[in-house]
Amino acid sequence: MAGLEGLDLRELLAFEPKGGVIRFAGQRALLMDPVALGLLRKELIGMLGMTAARGIFTRLGYAHGWRTAEAMKTAVPWTDEAEWRRAGGRLHTLMGQVRVERIERTDKDGPEPFAEAQWRDSYEAEQHLLHLGQADQPVCWSLTGFASGYLSYCNNKPIYCAELKCVGHGDALCHIVGRPQEEWSAECTEFLRFYETQCMEGVLGQVTEALRQTERKLRAKRQSLARVSGVTEDPAGMVARAEAMQRVLNLARRSAKVDTTILVTGESGVGKERIARLIHDESGRAPKAFIAVNCAAVTESLLESELFGHAKGAFTGATHDRPGLFEAAHGGTLFLDEVGEVPPAMQAKLLRALQEREVRRVGENTSRKVDVRVVAATNRELSEEVRLGRFRQDLFYRLRVIELRIPPLRERKEDILPLARLLLAEAGERLGRRVNGLSPDAAEQLLRYAWPGNVRELGNAIERAVVLCEGPRVERDDLPEEVRAAPPPLVPSGNPRRLEDMEKEYILAVLAQNGGNRSRTAEQLDIGVATLYRKLKQYGHPEAAH
């Protein structure tokens, strides 16, 4: 390939005819539907506003341009490196995003820009017009960002492009110019903030306040639904009839007043994040941010950057300084869910952050002070993990200054029906179904089931029942199969029941669990099929008719 004009899409693109991984200049590439990107733009503008959405797309384009320049440096045997620097516009055209035309300047007034071009067929302007109509500002945000990222990498210094005319703004063509940062006059630098994360701060502040207002409304709505359902709630919006759960809430409130690290333990689905939010809301940090991160959902290579942030150039794609979640939660609470999944190498860094109350961004040599209250949670038995050498003992003790152990739902039977009624009222409201309560059979079956998925599983079961029920209340048949098949308890409570009644109930439960399969049921009960048939006939069960 001799130079810029020799760039050929057929040589840059590699793919298997039957499908699979597509590569552009040796790097993996994706085929994206522009309408999908247009819909994403519409969603982000509606959710975050024009300023924040523009910042996101600009920085996305910048990263794309930077990565493309980096890949193209070695992917093509350039006869002249200057050709590589000028290839950005040609590559933009080959990618199908925009058709780039160079401008031959005849006007010699004023300094000639570092880079200049006009664009035709901009997919970004096309999609903005399609989904949002004509704008009062240029809208080729990611395309401008791409040009800036490509030029910045090639010239080893920040080069920023601005769109002076745009089809999405009503102009005949899109027109961009690019200059080094120091050459932009003070009155023209407003657009530069879209290349930095600072343009998000005001918007994020508004979003945070809107979320707080929404949380207050949801809490009030939940309390209203609780009154309708006849369930007396804890002031924090939690159901706690069981003495064990009341002790947890009491300890959580007392702990909230003391600014120390707290470890919340319990099985999956018991409500550990709700307890963490209660601690935040009851503390002096309530006006500040509550930020939650699931440590198990972030890869080991990204977890350090996610928690502590990174400096520009720390790794490929780190085009700007970025604060981590510790800094974002400054003054507030950071909730580390599934902390037992943190890799060993990160455990030492997390311990240091907790002890020193400071973090060091990836790629930096200096530390930054942070004022954060950490609440951690896990469904693992961390003491056992320590014994097995998978979790640092010093970190375990640092996290477990106070431990709140949430009992599973099966150990707090008193909470099952109040929770079910509250969840029923919420699901009915959300789904627009008029469901007034639970039938006695349904309520009894809820109490029989062990709920291995705890409150989360109960909520899913109730929502399913609300969707399926045909009458004004949830019946036993509306519940999930595994809940319907739960056998009666072996130890009677209250007045003892007749052995004959318990036998009947147990046989029918096992039959239901086996989907009506009499042979399998008889085998599990260790009785003959004829004996089972006789008993079903005695009970008047429909299976006896087959």
Image (spheres, helix red, strand yellow):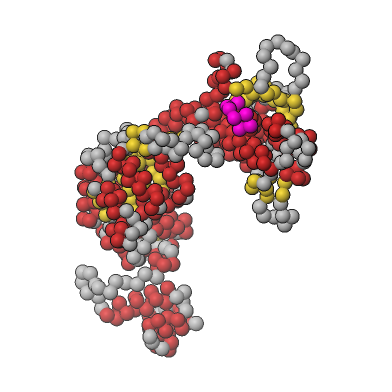
* Residue found at x 72% / y 25%: 118
Q: Is residue 238 visible?
A: no
Which percent across, then down, holds residue 339?
36, 51
* Residue found at x 34% / y 55%: 391
Which percent across, then down, holds residue 54?
56, 30
Is 341 part of what is drawn in magenta? no
Horizontal arrangement in the rendering, residue 91 relative to residue 161 (left or right):
right
* Residue found at x 25% / y 42%: 260
Q: Quadrant of residue 319?
A: top right
162 or 158: which is nearer to us? 158
246 or 332: which is nearer to us? 332
219 or 49: which is nearer to us? 49
250 or 313: which is nearer to us? 313
Identify the magenta region.
153-159
Is 158 part of what is drawn in magenta? yes
Q: Quadrant of the N terminus?
A: top right
Which percent across, then down, holds residue 503?
32, 79
Q: Is residue 475 above or below residue 510?
A: above
Q: Is residue 374 above or below residue 464?
A: above
Q: Is residue 279 above or below residue 147?
A: below
Horizontal arrangement in the rendering, residue 472 relative to residue 285 (left or right):
right
Q: Quadrant of residue 522?
A: bottom left
Which percent across, then down, holds residue 73?
66, 38
